Image: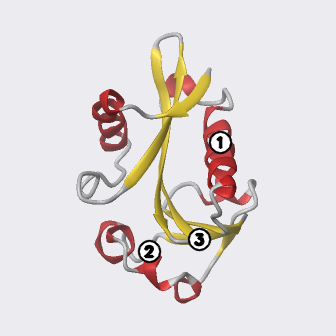
Amino acid sequence: MHIDRAKESDLHRVRELLAEAGLPVDDLVSADIGFWVARDATGISGAIGVERFGTACLLRSLVVTDRGRRQGTGSALVQELESSMRAHGVRMLVLLTETAESFFGKRGYTVTPRERVPDQVRQSGEFRTLCPASAVCMSKAL
């Protein structure tokens, strides 16, 4: 497996994976989201996105295929994203999740009250309309 920035030609498959997993796709065209993909011998086995707001970023839609699960794919994608964002001056990653609180908690993310998230992140489509209010907000300082 190797991880790299998604190419334009990868985005259709990334969108399919997100939709299959029930993750938000409605704003993928309108929001400025960068994706990384994990590739194995048969193609894309996972993806992770990020939407940047100055020194804070919204981690968007970590998704791993069935064949990529329990192979370290999700962890590798998160590590690559964190390293890249840190190198580009990002100081905080924020996410909303309904199903992966434990996964991210094991990687140093903590539950964060929404009002403590930077305003620009809270104005994102994901915060305003795409994720339900019941989603857990988490963050990690980089």
Q: Amino acid at mark 2?
A: Ser
Going from N to C along the chain, the mark reached first, 3 or 2, is 3
* Disc 2 element: loop
Q: Which mark is residue 55?
A: 3
Nearer to us of marks 1 and 3 is: 3
The span from disc 3 to disc 2 (Cα, nearest Å) is 26 Å
Residue on which the image places disc 1: 80
* Disc 1 element: helix
* Mark count: 3
Going from N to C along the chain, the mark reached first, 1 or 3, is 3
Residue on which the image places disc 2: 134
Front residue of 12/96: it is: 12
Mark 3 vs 2: CB contact within 8 A: no
Compared across the picture, whether 105 is left or right of 34 comes to right
Q: Amino acid at mark 1?
A: Glu
Front residue of 96/36: it is: 36
Quadrant of the image occupied by residue 111: bottom right
Q: Amino acid at mark 3?
A: Thr
Assign the C terminus to one quadrant of the image. bottom right
Q: Which mark is residue 60?
A: none
Colouring rule applied to residues: secondary structure
Instruction: Estimate how packed mark 2 is, as few (under 14), some (14 to 19) or many (20 or more) residues with alpha carbons within 10 Å.
Output: few
* Rendered location of residue 134, percent (x, y): 44, 74
* Rendered location of residue 61, percent (x, y): 45, 51
